[in-house]
Image: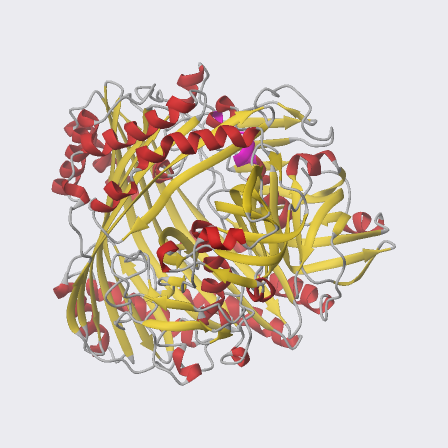
Amino acid sequence: MKDIAKLAVQAAVDRGVDYADARVVEQKDESLRVRNGSVDNLSSGQTLGFGVRVLASGAWGFASSSRVATDEVPKVVERAIGIARASARLHPNPVVLAPVQAFIDSYATPMERDPWSVPLDEKLGLLFEADKAMKAVGKDVITESSLHFFAESKVFCSSAGSMIEQKICESGGGISATAVGGGESQQRSYGDNYAKAGYEWIERLNLAEQGGRVAGEALALLDAKQCEPGTTTLVIDSAQMALQIHESCGHPVELDRVLGMEASFAGTSFLTLDKLGKFRYGSDIVNITADATIPGALGSFGYDDEGVPAQRIEVIKQGILAGYLTSRETAPVLSQASNGTMRADGWNRIPLIRMTNISLEPGEGTLADLISGVDRGLFISRNKSWSIDDRRLNFQFAAEIGWEIKNGRLGAMVKNPVYTGITPEFWGKCDGIAGPEEWVLWGIPNCGKGEPMQVAHVGHGSSPARFHDVKVGVGSW
Amino acid sequence: MVGEEKASEIIDFVLKNSQAEQSEVVIMGGRSELTRFAQSAVHQNMAEDNAVVYIKVVIGDRVGRVSTNKLDPDSLKATLQQATEQARRSAVTPHASAQAAPSSYSKLDTYDDVTAAYTPMDRVEVISKMAAVAAGYGFSASGAFTTAVEEIAVANSNGVYGYTKGTVTSLSALVASDSSYGYADAVSKSVGDIYGEALARTAAEKCLNCAHPAEVEPGEYDVILEPKAVATMLSFFASLGFGARSYQEGRSFVSGRLGQQIAGRNISLWDNGLDERGLAVPFDFEGVPKQRLDLIVDGVATGIAYDVESAALQGKQSTGHALPPDAREYTSDPLPLNLFLQPGDSSLEQMIGSIEKGLLVTRFHYTNIVHPLKAIITGMTRDGTFLIENGRIASGVKNLRFTQSILTALENVDMIGRDVSLKADDYYGASLVPALKIRNFNFTGVTEH
């Protein structure tokens, strides 16, 4: 793999490009799903190829091929250069890259048990056990249990002098129960959490232990009261906070979005450059970081796909916009070096600015403390629905389940808890964040961005948090 | 991509070497090129060439599925071995042994030589002209221009064999001013059908007319959804309601209501992968011939989409709606992906003229499901939302959030456009749909732009 990458970069340099990098990537994955007591999916796959990115005449070109062979390299390089020359026809401002240090290095996900060494019987056995636990509570409940594993071996070589090898392993799994009856359908789930780790992560999820509760709550939701429309104090669990952070903070601090590069598809961002260092994004207790160095977190890695080392930066500091996720192309706009967030989802895609692990730093106290401070409100758990506008301002999210809060205590179960707001107004109403003991790191394997669509694996850590005066119960039911 | 000869060789090799009771091979190959532009400059420009072989083997009622893009004999043998081993060690999947039978396929005009030969420079030339149109208004243009050749080969040990090759191209135009956006797009099998400057002009006019948008209060409005928004809504409608698994499990709004009125009598919706006005394909990913499937006729639910496995489970015949093998990781529900909505007789001007106070929506953004059984979805409007007053476009308005049951919306369709447009789905396939005028569409929020 190293030889192909080196050959490609040298061939591009010999052709006089301003810059070149090449990635040779081999990925494999395995998916298992048990549904209603039967195997619904057992599939695996592998893909191998290389991609060459060149900067020529001040513009980008990228070409890729699944044929990893020395005689294929010149053709792909030639194609990439041809594409760059075409790009240059409509590229009035030549790309200027922030400087980067050259690295000769390797990185590997720390893991205790290689998922591919675990017998299939053991994996299926775990899923059947979880399925049985759910069915024991409700035989008519629609049950699903799933595991996913992903491994990547990647070589990055650049004309800046880097040669970096990375070996990544990811594991994740979850269960869900859907109850249907009386014109209503309701789902509860557990897990769906991914980590850069081996099979030990799956064992720690204890999927079967949660099966009974999950199925029971799905059934109970059928008869629960509808979330009433109004404005209330909302306490949000860690899992739903992960989604809240992802959509309303993670995406808007991507500098390519801010600069309009994703305008026609995913949109832009309300966090425009003039706001850096002064815009009040949230209340004083809101501190959000982007950290690609957290061991085991799904958004962690050694180096990004421009050869920039993983790092931790402040995004929101005491409620004020403090930083963006950047690349070598975009960072010079801020007179900065890249903070290393460029990732491609395979050999056949160009790297884009992607979230790493975007986390709300913990506050103090417990979830119980947050709830005890509420006279009337709502506690909600786990995401069900999500939508946000093209500048990441107007959002509407829904959780799977809610409970009324009355006089500091949880009360009746509530179904379809939908809430909505405008991002900085909402974060400005954050008046409580639970402490480190309640902080959970969530791995989300399906963050979509770009054309063609790329899927990134990202992480979000959060404790439960409390927001006052939030609009809930949207829609006609 | 590999071409038919090589695809046939790979299929023969796998089927001959398989020791399983049943085997199935799908090859999805292609050569795809994409040029993205933003603020009237090309900022991403790429090409890829790939082919993936998906092998499914069945031993008893146990299934193994493995894919690879390594096409040499040793890799294919190893992949086959892996699939066989998986099947041997797996547990039962009901009706996994159901298999498509050999069929003859329609000859479809799916390939355009000019599109296949289109170059990066060709695309940039079109984009340059679009940028010039936007500049003429004092605006900038963003978007993406794709040209691709796609191939699908399907075969099984029961004698099914099919190979098809097609081209597809899509072009989007987002034109931006300091205070507004406008949008237009097109998709076709042929670049000859794509008029970049016209798209840019449409987007620029929307942008111009939407400048300094006013704010309107959320609430129920008469609304005109242009075809892009209609296609998004119907794509959710089809996936929530008409898959065989959802239907059987009671998770679909059609469950228990087949043969009943579920939409207005003026609504007829069908799926037809053979209709060359859409992105046609002769067979599905199990090798079952595509056919017309009526989903709603005069407002009555009439059809459910089946693949071979779900059909066997429910004692039905496949309707040719098996999804690509890589979709199995996410769902085992077959889906209609080539939607057609019966056009009406109204022009867009007539629709606007009929509204005393209402809204016109160019497209939706980040639409998502709120409640599947009630078909409630939410999303934002973007890139051209207009206030209609007294039968005329009064002004652009700030984008609104809607939270709306699609079932209710389809009961409230007052007028249907006479012109149809092909609009691509985010996932796979495309819908040929007209604009709709809908009563009491529920807008539940507003944003700042």
Measured as percent of width and height from the top left, residue B216 is found at: 76, 59
> How many badges with numbers are in the image?
0
Outermost residue on the bottom side: it is A335
Q: Is residue A51 above or below residue A206?
A: below
Over which residues does the magenta segment extend? B238-244
Q: Nearer the viewer, residue A322 or B97?
A: A322
Residue sitting at 16 percent across and 30 percent down? B85
Task: Tell me, yes or no, whether the highlighted magenta stretch contains residue B243.
Answer: yes
Residue sitting at 72 percent across and 42 percent down? B418
Measured as percent of width and height from the top left, residue B409 is found at: 70, 38
Q: Is residue A52 above or below residue A406?
A: below
Q: Nearer the viewer, residue A89 or B89?
A: B89
Q: Nearer the viewer, residue A110 or A25?
A: A110
| Colouring of the image | secondary structure
Q: Quadrant of residue B446?
A: bottom right
Left or right: where A435 falls relative to A48: right
Residue sitting at 28 percent across and 63 percent down? A294
Let me know if residue A392 appears in the view.
Answer: no
Outermost residue on the top side: it is B315
Task: Tell me, yes or no, whether the highlighted magenta stretch contains residue A192.
Answer: no
Measured as percent of width and height from the top left, residue A321 is found at: 49, 74
Left or right: where A339 falls relative to B193: left
Q: Quadrant of residue A456?
A: bottom left
| Image quadrant containing the C terminus of chain B | bottom right
Let me know if residue B129 appears in the view.
Answer: yes
Q: Quadrant of residue A177?
A: top left
Decide whether the magenta segment is chiefly helix, strand or loop.
Answer: helix
Measured as percent of width and height from the top left, residue A120 is found at: 19, 33
Left or right: where A443 falls relative to B167: left
